[in-house]
Image (cartoon, rainbow, N blue to C red):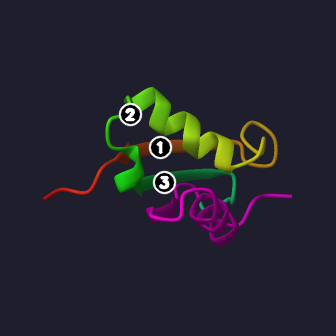
């Protein structure tokens, strides 16, 4: 069963409370999403570390229920 975009957003926000999360369904199939996650708590972390935090938030769903996630992360500007 595909993963719902709202569930992805909720899981990320629970693990990274200061995150601004935007989810887009790329193929309309519930399996291929793009996520943009902006969080002050990412400041000072490498892009790899930021992505690892997001993947940890998804609690092992990547590669299983959630087939593909194009991920962009960063810190707030200004």
* Nearer to us in this view, 75 or 1: 75
- The answer to whether mark 2 and mark 1 are in CB contact below 8 A is no
Residue at image mark 1: 71
Upstream in the sequence, badge 2 or badge 1? 2
* Nearer to us in this view, 36 or 33: 36
Distance of label 3 from label 1 (alpha carbons): 5 Å
Q: Residue at x 69, y 52 (%)?
A: 31
Distance of label 2 from label 3 (alpha carbons): 18 Å
- The answer to whether mark 2 and mark 3 are in CB contact below 8 A is no
> In what quadrant of the picture does the C terminus appear?
bottom left
| Residues packed near mark 3 inside 10 Å, few (<14), some (14 to 19) or many (20 plus) | many
Q: Secondary structure beneath disc 2?
A: loop
> Which range of residues does the magenta coloring cover?
1-27
Residue at image mark 2: 45
Could you say which quadrant of the image residue 56 lies in? top right
Q: Position of residue 43 (x, y in %)?
A: 32, 43
């Amino acid at each position: 069963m595909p993963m719902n975009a709202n569930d992805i957003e909720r899981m990320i926000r629970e693990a990274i409370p200061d995150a601004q999360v935007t989810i887009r369904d790329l193929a309309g199939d519930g399996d291929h999403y793009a996520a943009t996650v902006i969080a002050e708590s990412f400041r000072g972390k490498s892009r790899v570390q930021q992505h690892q935090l997001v993947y940890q938030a998804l609690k092992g769903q990547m590669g299983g229920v959630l087939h593909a996630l194009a991920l962009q992360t960063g810190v707030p500007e200004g």
